Amino acid sequence: MYKASRILVPVDFSDVARAAISMAVQLADRHGAELIFLHVDAGLEKQIESEILYSPESHGSEASILSQEAMLKDAVALEVSRAAEGGPALKLGRVRTIISGGDPVGVALQTIDAEGVDLVVMGTHGPQGLKGMILGSTAEQLVKRAGCSVFVVKPTGLPYLRD
């Protein structure tokens, strides 16, 4: 039987990301796995670079990171408490959060390798716009490129495409 020991959950604070958090908590409980929640803010790197170059005394990026980290921890705590309602105590491993700037796919792939992740659980919005149709969604890119299994949670109402 497949056993996950370290689960990565990329989070963008959407409804489908909340569903992925819930699914990841259930899987981690079943396997006693560690959970790593990752939020990537593509604009964060540029904000930090701008502050370093033009206003070294500014701390806007630090406040942004702390705000996003608080939001991520709140979202995780809410889903963990929902999963625990009316049932036995959860058997989760360690729970961590990571906030990063950069390309979401690149950061997720680096995190998978650096942390020894053996399962990714994430939501998908499906390809959006022309760029999404050409390059594919973040979830699609991770399915293609990750060195581990990827469990994709679809939003309600997203059509299932058949050959």
Image (cartoon, rainbow, N blue to C red):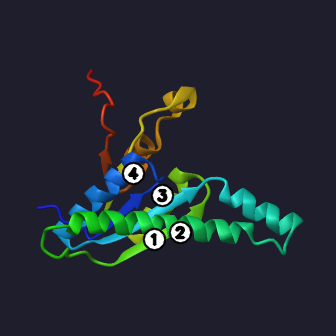
Q: Nearer the viewer, mark 1 or mark 3?
A: 1
* Kind of residue indicated by mark 4: Ala
* Kind of residue indicated by mark 3: Ala
How far is the residue under mark 1 from the one under mark 3? 13 Å
Disc 3 secondary structure class: helix
Q: Quadrant of the N terminus?
A: bottom left
Query: For the point 69% across and 60% down, which residue is it?
Result: 45
Which of the two residues, 1 or 86, is positioned nearer the viewer here? 86
Q: Which x, y percent locates residue 152?
A: 32, 46
| Residue 53 appears in the rendering | yes
Neighbours of disc 1 within 10 Å: few (<14), some (14-19), many (20+) = some
Identity of the residue furthest to the top in this view = 163
Query: For the point 29% across and 25% down, which residue is it?
Result: 161
The residue indicated by pointer 3 is 108
The residue indicated by pointer 2 is 69
Q: Say which quarter of the image contains residue 158.
A: top left
Q: Is residue 80 above or below residue 152?
A: below
Q: Which x, y percent locates residue 30?
A: 16, 67
Query: For the point 32% across and 51% down, which residue is it?
Result: 19
- How many marks can you see? 4
* Kind of residue indicated by mark 2: Glu
Circles 2 and 1, Cβ within 8 Å, touching? The answer is yes
Residue 97, label in figure: 1
Residue 17, label in figure: 4
How far is the residue under mark 3 from the one under mark 2? 17 Å
Circles 2 and 4, Cβ within 8 Å, touching? The answer is no
Circles 1 and 4, Cβ within 8 Å, touching? The answer is no
Circles 1 and 3, Cβ within 8 Å, touching? The answer is no
